[in-house]
Amino acid sequence: MPGFVDIHVHGGGGADYMDGTLEAVRTAGRTHLRHGATTVFPTTTTGSPAQIQRMLDACAAVRAAWTPADGARIAGVHLYGPYFAAKKVGCHAVEGRRDPSASEYENYFRQGIVRIATCAAELPNAGAFYRAARRRGCLVTCGHSNATWSEMALAYKAGMRHVDHFWCAMSSVDSLRAAYGTPMQAGMEQFVLAREEMSTEVIADGEHLSQELLEFAYRMKGPRRLCLVTDANRALEMPPGRYRFGPIEDGSWIQSNGRVGLAPGAGLASSVVALDTMVRNMKKMTTASLAEVVRMASLTPAERAGIADQVGSLEAGKLADIVLLDRQLRVRRVFVGGEEVTVGRDLSCGGVKPDQSATP
Ligand SMILES: [Zn+2]
Ligand SMILES: [Zn+2]
């Protein structure tokens, strides 16, 4: 298979990209590479401008001197936090949320590493943010939002073409009714389903979305508009326990039970499994063919993020990032740029350390 491409990933192996150190970037990158993700877009959480800048600097530094020993290729950063709706921050620290300001985001965009850009469509200046991101050639996305249909239509005009983790932290008929009363109105879900050009992504860990929702997303959007993402946090490949989501010094606390991240209270708090697990789940839980599942984990995210000329499929002229899997779709060998990388332990069992599962 072509190496997997993850457009929404926060960390793994104990590290969050928002820790902002070169070692954290490498640790997360190596963890995902072992699971077959040869290209990643490290994804910001909410945080202060200094924390986001530190994360961009660390990713840029690793990318500038990158070798496969540093882990998955960094194709660019997904600027995800901080421009979320106040009531839809989910497990992100709410103190690090704010409305978009041109002086802040233009500074990030100028540095050239941001390739995917998220903003909630209802925020003041969201349109200006989308147009600026579009000018830079980013995949422009709406997430952590309670946007109405008309706000989505305006966002679409400004270049927005993608919605983050479908059904998670986004508007629905119900959430809009709670906010605006009747008549009931359409929101992000209907907009994504009604507009062919809109793409989205699912967290197929079996914990966020049921089998019928994964099947529904696949059937409605098809393999050319649906991406598999991990949205993984630092607890990937780590034992169950309490972890910081986002920056190590003040990110919000989440709990990992070894299968998924949990926020205090009731909510889910991103995944703790990798893309190989998502591929296995999508094959097992939906009617998508293996080729379609692989496309959703490689070529489709590569196309949406504008890097399909380099990665995403096995074609002459591309970078020869290749994953070999066994019949159970477990990662056996990983090649980056045509060269095999040592993937180390077999960690394809998804979040559970082999030494723990072997313990009686
Ligand atoms: Zn999110
Ligand atoms: Zn996320």
Image (tube, rainbow, N blue to C red):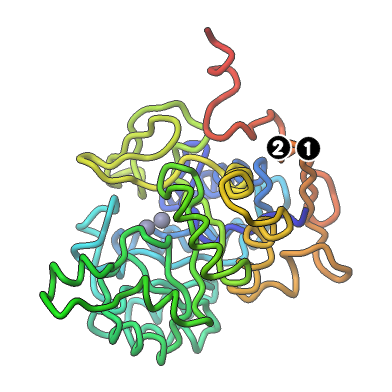
Residue at 80% of width from left, 44% of height from top?
Answer: 324
**Foreground pick, 352 / 101:** 352
67 up-or-down from 113: above or below: above
Q: In the displayed image of the protein, which residue is found farthest to the right? A: 316
| Circle 1 residues within 10 Å: few <14, some 14–19, many ≥20 | few
Is residue 57 visible to us here? Answer: no
Instruction: Indicate the secondary structure of the residue bearing disc 1.
Output: loop
The quarter of the rendering in which ligand 2 is drawn is bottom left
Q: Given contact means CB atoms under 8 Å apart, are the residues at marks 1 and 2 in contact?
A: yes
Determine the CA span between mark 1 and mark 2: 5 Å
Q: In the displayed image of the protein, which residue is found farthest to the left? A: 181
Give residue 188's quadrant in the image.
bottom left
Q: Amino acid at mark 2?
A: Arg
Q: Which residue is mark 1?
A: 326
Q: Residue 330, which numbered label?
A: 2
**Foreground pick, 335 / 180:** 180
Horizontal placement of 158 versus 338: left or right? left
CB of mark 1 near ligand 2 (< 8 Å):
no
